[in-house]
Amino acid sequence: MKISLNWLKEYIEISETPEEIAHILTMTGLEVEGVESIETIKGGLRGVVIGEVLECAKHPNADKLSVTSVDIGELEPSPIVCGAPNVEEGQKVLVAKVGTTLYPEGSDGFKIKKAKIRGEISMGMICAEDELGLGTKHEGIMVLDTKLANGTEAREYFNIEDDVVFEIGLTPNRADGTSHLGATRDLKAVLERPISWPDVSDFKIDNNSSKIRVTVEDAVGCPRYSGISISNVTIRESPEWLKNRLLSIGQTPINNIVDVTNFILHELGQPLHGFDADKIHGNKIIVKTLEQDTLFTTLDENERKLHETDLMICDEREGMCIAGVFGGIASGISENTKNIFLESAYFSPDYIRKTSLIHGLKTDSAFRFERGTDPLNTVYALKRAAMLIRELAGGEISSDIIDIYPNKIEPFEVPMKFKNIDRLIGKSLSKEMIFTILKNLDIEIKDENIDGFLAIVPPYRVDVTREADVIEEILRIYGYDNIELKDSISSDYLADFPKITKESTQLKAAELLVSNGYFEISTNSLTKPAYAEHSTFINENENVTIINRLSEDLGVLRQSLLYSGLEVVAHNINRKQNNLKIFEFGSVYKKTESRVYEEKEYLSIWITGYNNQESWMAKNKPVEFHDLSAIVVKLIEKFTDAKLKSVLLTEEIFNYGLGFNLDNSRVAKIGLLNKNIRAQNSIDQDIYYAEIDINRLLSTTVTGFSVEEISKFPEVRRDLSLVLDNSVTFEQIKEITEEKEFSGVLKNINIFDYYVGEKIEKDKKAYAISFILQDKSKTLTDKVIDRIMSRLMKKFELNLGAVIRQ
């Protein structure tokens, strides 16, 4: 939404800079997203003055040029060479002084410089209309009929008015700010200056010759409908002041009647609609809805099918306008219009919002009606518009004001407590301050007592209906910048952490896997009985058998997700898709010896093939065990801060594998599937498989978080090379580093190299490990670091039989 500074100045005294006004509006909730300077004429005719030609003679060296002496209000007349055929002594002319930049139409501008033309000095330029950007004529210079003094700026002669326009990002709760007077209300409240409302006291009815009647059949959709007739108008171009007002905010002037309605909309925030009164069949207006799929042609010449909830302005024959949204092509104002009926109404925001969405019509009127206009403003807006139309288009007001308002919309009554105002603002404001702010916001005070009062909120403040809303109104006018920060920040209310559910855990886990290149699959819970017959890890007696099975291949409920995923892998490999990373959330089922049926939920992951597609940029590598273990660890640690421990795993399905425990309870297992398992689906290539117990993971999921200050002291890295027995695991190394004597300073350890080969003994392996040390309270010295590393090496030697390679 655009707001013009010059327009605002018509209603309130403003001495502040545009930047200061932008800040005030932003802090009151009308966020200014941009400030733009607008020039009626590009360059603003700066540097162009009125001059008088004192002397004019033919140029001695050019037949078509004249040498003039021009008084431009300076100590000495300026010599100017002029090529215009109509220049003469005694003329009042417009002179662009040296240094002035002119912007003829279609030009990027040119600068006037001191010049020597055919041997004669020229100190400026006597200008034609097109050279100043005032028109297209170039037959000769502009000759003025004026008594203004020489040297007077051309801006003053032409009454040029530059402007500043604020681009406001209007939030849905600020329906009261959808106009210039809406923004003025906020300035009034902050600056405590009076508003000069447009005067309508001279409004009068000329006659009652119009016979238009109004019936409102849908009072829910149209709680208030006002209208007036104006006869014998003349449709013509609007005056400059009105066109400039509309142009400044990006509106295109159309004609005097339409421009007045647009002007009122942006002045008061009240949409109006003008009908050609001679096109209203039966001289009757009916506000109602029409049947579903009724055809109606709007002003943009599109034929639309109406919805049964679309509120329409109709005559006795047909619809004339989609109420509050868009006019119809048949009843609008045209150049031949002589008599008009002017509508000013309050329509239900719900009706307008629904219609606007259904038809995809985002108009200025709908923008305001769907947020909520002022139901008390319809008659005032009519009077203001009627007076302007009579002034600009002639004619006479030919009817009384029609005002159908069966159920009065009352102000909101909001009980207020002083203690709640202080509590929510975070600062105690005086009663006088509170009452002054509310009065400046047109909020009336009633029933004041020692504890509080009753706030009477005008209906145009549609979003101020609760105590907290009124307090927010007080705060935004008092100023957020005026609330001092305390030494410790606190909040009156902090929202609870979202409840951890199985569904939210699954969603977060899926997002993590997908972001790492995995694809989710969904398979049938029914599977082949043969899988249990050929696998010892599945107990055939625990199968949940389907009585009315669809086929022999879908005879039981699965006891594991493993084979469901392997079928997907086989399907893809058979179609030359060998590089796969897939996962599935699913249930498994079994029947216990006591014939109790159990259902558990797991997350299973399968990876096979290569990590990436072939590329010249990097050598491709097959997926490895650690690719899967890394993503499983990352996934578990995303949901819990419980200590995760890994143990070697010997299970029938794996050639080798690891189990992950939380608090001595198994949460996940991963490994390389053995050949026999793969063979059941005719798969030759290696497949790594992981299985995560969702319910177990959910039971350890943490809901809060802790924060700590980032250490001001530097990290230090030390590296060790250890030769160990093959039976020693990294988990054992990690357990030593987590002992109490090291936990305060040892921040992280990492294996960055691994070796098995001829250079070390058989059944041995070498780890190259980095250690990151940091003390949160002081800088570690070399002496302290060496002592810590020495103790670590002794522990590795004694507990793990490690050989430290120097």
Image: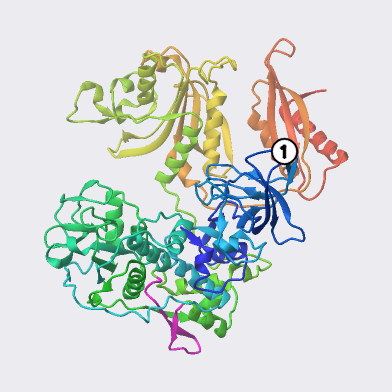
Foreground residue among 349 and 788: 349
Image position of 728 with respect to 600: above or below: above
- Vertical placement of residue 257 versus 438, above or below: above
- The residue tagged with tag 1: helix, strand or loop? loop
Total numbered labels:
1
Q: Is residue 325 visible?
A: yes
**x and y percent of residue 756 in the render?**
68, 15
The correct choice, above or below, for 701 with respect to 199 in the image is above
User: At label 1, which amino acid type do we have?
Assistant: Arg
- The residue wearing badge 1 is 118
Q: Which residues are magenta?
A: 442-461
Residue 644 or residue 650, whichever sits in front: 644
**Residue 592 in picture, x, y percent from top left:** 32, 36
Where residue 505 appears, x then y in whole percent?
A: 45, 43
Magenta span includes 458: yes
Q: How is the image coloured?
A: rainbow
Disc 1 crowd, CA 10 A, few/some/many (<14, 14-19, 20+): few
Relative placement, left or right, of 221 versus 20 is left
Q: Which quadrant, please, contains the C terminus?
A: top right
- Magenta stretch: includes residue 159: no
